[in-house]
Amino acid sequence: MKDSLNQVPGESVEVVEPPSDIESAVKRLAALPLLEYDQVRDAEAEMLGVRVSVLDGEVKKARKSNGTDTGKSGRELKLPEPEPWPQEVDGDDLLEQLAHAFRRYVSLPDHTPEALALWTMHAHCLDAATISPRLFLTSPEMRCGKSTLLLVLGRLVPRPLPAMNVTAAVLFRTVELARPVLLLDEADTFAKDNEEMRGIINSGHERTGSVLRLVGDDHEPRQFSTWSAMVIAGIGKMPGTIEDRSIIIKMRRKRSDEVVERLRIDRTPDLDRLARMVARWSADHVIALKELDPSTPSALNDRAADNWRALLAIADIAGGGWSERAREVSIALSNSDGSDDTSTRVLLLADIEAIFGKTGDDKITSDALCNRLHEMEDRPWPEWRAGKPISKNQVARQLKHFGIVPGVFRVGAETARGYKIEAFNDAFARYLPNRPVTSSQTAENSQLLENRPVTMNNDVTGQNPSKPLSSNDCYDVTGQIGDMGVNAHNSSEYDQFDADDIEREAIMNEEFYPD
């Protein structure tokens, strides 16, 4: 009553409600040790009329607010973020300094210091990118400088998080929580054959990348972002899908006459200064980077162009000759000639194209093709499986993925099974885009084939490919099989055979039975 008498007319009075039963219960439960809380959580949730997962969440928040969340093992993540440099920074000079810093501490092949400098700036400018290429540090053996390079990168990038032997769950939950730049060392020991890990690494290549997981006792589907800048270091190769999304830095052991400075991780004022300068440059140019759509070299395939686009944008804005320089580096490190393609099938395509180019013929028997593959000592074909060379059956299985199947054609007075170059041309153009497509109709090959006699030893006919086929040349092959199949030729000498019979003959031959 006294309070109401002292109330000023027209002034509202704040009514303080006593804490509800659930608020009191949450506060009480948050003060319990974890083991005791786990014993009573089901009963408490039922009594309060809420789901257990909801009660868990409220208790967890209460623990954080009152500082009693002491039941966790390990340490809280603390990711250092460099304070931006106080003055404006010249991008051209900054990239030069970064490249010099990498050369200072690590023995590196040509073009890689520039790539590392650009990627470091990309890690700071991640908000401006839609694709983040993985930086894959690989070497044939240990002691090639991968771990040292990771340490240098760790001093230069924002929110670095070094890790080894992490699980897939830890990876995506950490990315969702802290948005670190992940520095995964010895990835060949835990990520190479882990399909779940591979999927998370691959999905984080794009800004929209995420994984879905069921969370809580009620199995609620929740989305976790996997978008992050990531460095992967390991011995040997990684799965093709990871390498395809990566800028690959091929490390090598330092020669005795090469001199690099030993890195003291507790004495890196030069690297700390550079990190601050990159942070300032990023803050000043992130909006311009978002708006820029840089051109990419035509020599890059689509994936490589995606990988390099964000780095090329940085080079374009930095200026000082870095636009041209960055594009030269992108071509040099992208293996645009396909010589290091991780797909064995693509390697087989490339070698078959080379065989057609070397022989100058427009077709080859299965036997002749295998013989030539077996002669390639630097390829897997001589010891394909269990020390044995690749067989006709195994070649056919690999080529079937491209829709290419062996056909039947005339070799002198007999028929043979093999492949015509026209069956490969589409696959050559699609999977070996930066190689000149070998054509049986080039002037050089036409000259080679001019008037060549038909012989069994050559396993090919001497047809001049610059002239149209006549019926007595009889390139009878299987009927149309997919887009890559070869249409059966209407040969008068083969009219007595149905196209299905010829196809069945080719497919059911002993070479198509499993080994």
Image: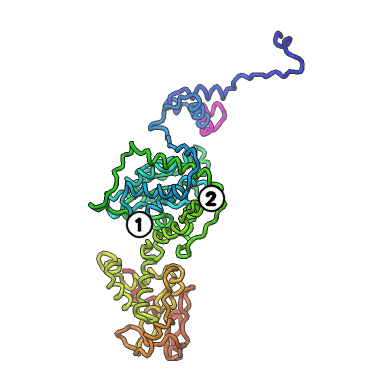
Q: Position of residue 98 (x, y in %)?
A: 40, 47
The answer to which quarter of the image holds residue 267 is top left
First to last magenta residue range: 44-55
Q: Quadrant of the N terminus?
A: top right
Whole-angstrom CA distance, mark 2 to mark 1, is: 27 Å
> Which residue is found at the position 47% from the left and 88% from the top?
468
Tell whether 1 sits left or right of 83.
Answer: right
Q: Quadrant of the C terminus?
A: bottom left
Q: Residue furthest left?
A: 256
Tell me: residue 459, above or below residue 297. Answer: below
Q: Answer whether residue 51 is magenta in the image.
A: yes
Tell whether 292 sits left or right of 300.
Answer: right
Tell me: residue 440, above or below residue 54. Answer: below
Q: How is the image coloured?
A: rainbow
The main secondary structure of the magenta stretch is helix
Q: Which mark identifies residue 282? A: none
Task: Name the N-terminal-most of marks 2 and 1.
Answer: 1
Q: Which secondary structure lies at badge 2?
A: helix
The reply to whether residue 413 is in sight is no
Mark 2, residue position: 289
Tell me: residue 142, above or below residue 86. Answer: below
Q: Which secondary structure lies at badge 1?
A: loop
Mark 1, residue position: 110
Tell me: residue 397, above or below residue 202. Answer: below
Q: Answer whether residue 331 is magenta in the image.
A: no
**How would you rate the neighbour count of disc 1 (Cα within 10 Å): few for under 14, some for 14-19, many for 20 or more?**
few
Tell whether 33 sits left or right of 375.
Answer: right
Disc 1 marks a residue whose amino acid type is Asp
Q: Residue furthest top?
A: 2
Disc 2 marks a residue whose amino acid type is Leu
Q: Position of residue 336 (x, y in %)?
A: 41, 64
> Which residue is found at the position 34% from the left and 72% from the top?
393
